[in-house]
Image (cartoon, grey):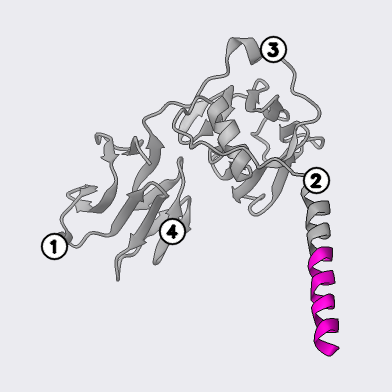
Amino acid sequence: MEGLKLRFPEHHHPEMPLGSGVHAIGRIGDTVGLVGDDESPSVRLFVDRRGVWMTVADGARGIHVNGRPVKRMAMLRLGDAIYLDGVKMLLVSSRKVEALPEALRHVPGEFRGDCRVVVRGVGGRHHGRSFTLEAPRLVGRSDEADIRIDDPAFAERHARIEMIGNQVVLRDLGSGEGSVVNGEAVRDALLSPGDQIVFDVHHRFVIEAPAAHTVLLTRVAGNDDAPEIAAPPRRRGRRLPWLLLTAAVLAAAITGLLLLGGG
C-alpha cells in the first residue's frame, strides 16, 4: 500500500508518512512519533502490499483502535483511529476521496444494484451486520432507514448509499455534519471496496465486494493500478460427446482383449 500516513487531528504534529516496512512508534515528550527499536516503542506498524497491521509491545497499556483496547495485534484500515498514550492518530491516504462527479450528482440510484456488494458494519450498533446494495440503503434516524442510527442529534435522513451502474455512491441528504470516508470529511463521494465510512463518530462501515467485482469497481473509481483479470475460459460445449465416444471405443477394445484372452 502506497501513500499512507498518520494524521494527528488533535495535536500540532506534522503528518507522518508510512512507506513499506516497519515503523516503531513511541512516546516523545508530550506527543508520540517514530523511535528506534532501542527506545522501547509502544507499537510497531507493518506496511506492505497486503495492508497494514499493528503489534503492541509487551507491557504497553492504553492502546486503542476505534475505541477498542488492543493488547497484542490488530489489522488496520484507512480511517482507523489509533490512540496511544492519549494521542489520537488517524490512518489516512495521500489520495483524496473522489468527489461525486457533477454528471452523477442528480442521477437517482438504480433500484437493482448488486447483492454481491455489501456495506458491512465494523463498529457501533451495527457491528457484524451486512447490508447488500441490491437496492439503495438509507442511513438515518428515521424508522424507514435501512441503516438506523438511533441518536437524537442524528438526521432522520442523513445519507444514502447506492449503486449507479457499477459505481458505489455516497449521497448526502442534507445532514448537518456530513460523513467521514477514510478519515476525510465528505458529503457526496464515489466509494471503492475497502473504503471505511463513519457516521456519528462511532458507527463504522466498510464497502466490500467479490474479488472480480472489486477490480471493476476500483477501476471505475479511478485506480489504474488494479491488477488485470484474465477473461474466463470459453466453454467448449462439444468436448463432452467426443470424450464419451473415446471412452466407448476404449471400453470395447478392452472387452475384446479380455474375450480373446479368455479364448
The Cα atoms of the two marked residues, 2 and 4, are separated by 52 Å
- Nearer the observer: mark 2 or 3; the answer is 2
Q: Main secondary structure of the magenta part?
A: helix
Q: Earlier in the sequence, mark 3 or mark 4?
A: 4
Badge 3: how crowded within 10 Å, few (<14), some, or many (20+)?
few
The answer to whether one can see residue 85 in this image is: no
Q: Nearer the viewer, residue 214 or 243?
A: 243
Q: Amino acid at mark 3?
A: His
Picture disc at residue 74: 4
Secondary structure at numbered mark 3: loop
Secondary structure at numbered mark 4: strand
Q: Earlier in the sequence, mark 2 or mark 3?
A: 3
Q: Quadrant of residue 174?
A: top right
The Cα atoms of the two marked residues, 3 and 4, are separated by 40 Å
Magenta segment: 248-263
Which residue in the protein does label 3 denote? 106
Badge 2: how crowded within 10 Å, few (<14), some, or many (20+)?
few
Is there CB contact under 8 Å for labels 1 and 2? no
Q: Nearer the viewer, residue 163 or 155?
A: 163
Q: Earlier in the sequence, mark 2 or mark 4?
A: 4
Q: Amino acid at mark 1?
A: Asp
Q: Amino acid at mark 2?
A: Arg
User: Is-magenta flag for residue 4?
Assistant: no
The C terminus is located in which quarter?
bottom right
Q: Amino acid at mark 4?
A: Ala
Which residue in the protein does label 2 denote? 238
The Cα atoms of the two marked residues, 3 and 1, are separated by 56 Å
Q: Earlier in the sequence, mark 1 or mark 4?
A: 1
